[in-house]
Image (cartoon, rainbow, N blue to C red):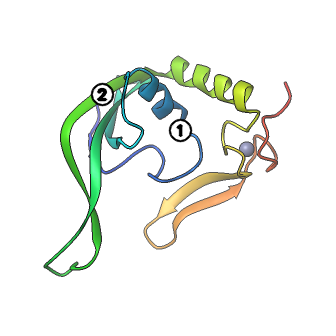
Amino acid sequence: MSETTKDAAPKKLGDTRPNHAEQRARSKLPCLPEAWRVVKWRVLGKSGDAVEFTFQESRMKTLKSGPNRGKERREWFGPERSAIVTDSEERAEFARYERETGNCGVCGDTGQEWMGWSRVNGDRYRPCVRCTATGKAPAK
Ligand SMILES: [Zn+2]
């Protein structure tokens, strides 16, 4: 079992690229409100072949005092709900997404794939290798 990270997700929250593992986790939680977000996730097992996602309701709160006064911060509240997604389930969801949407499973019709994050520059992207930046699922 590795560390649990608060306020983190495999991809940045708000990123429009599909997160197949998160999507699969959502489908395992009936009636999970769309607005609930991943509050934490952790990799299970030494080989990292499963991920547990935990969802929770949140809202943005404007800080009223302190050095960050006026800035918005996400506040989590209420019960948590979790689901475990294995590697093969994630791959199946990837295939389902491409089959049903016709979009590239990596970049989700944006033509740009995520390549990393840095504190200075934030998220970085490059032309998607899988679909050669077309955004469409490659023909088999
Ligand atoms: Zn792509």
Q: Position of residue 89 (x, y in %)?
A: 52, 19
The image's mark for residue 120 is none
Q: Quadrant of the N terminus?
A: top left
Residue 105 occupies which quadrant of the picture? top right
Q: Is mark 2 within 8 Å of ligand 1?
A: no
* CA gap, disc 1 and disc 2: 16 Å
Helix, strand or loop at mark 1: loop
Identified at 78% across, 35% down, the residue is: 137
Furthest toward the right, the residue is 139
Residue 45 occupies which quadrant of the picture? top left
Identified at 38% across, 43% down, the residue is: 35
Helix, strand or loop at mark 2: strand
Number of numbered discs visible in the structure rendering: 2
Residue 64 occupies which quadrant of the picture? bottom left
Identified at 74% across, 51% down, the residue is: 111
Q: Earlier in the sequence, mark 1 or mark 2?
A: 1
The image's mark for residue 19 is 1
Q: Is residue 114 above or below residue 120?
A: above
Quadrant for ligand 1 reads top right
Residue 32 vs residue 14, the one in the foreground: 32
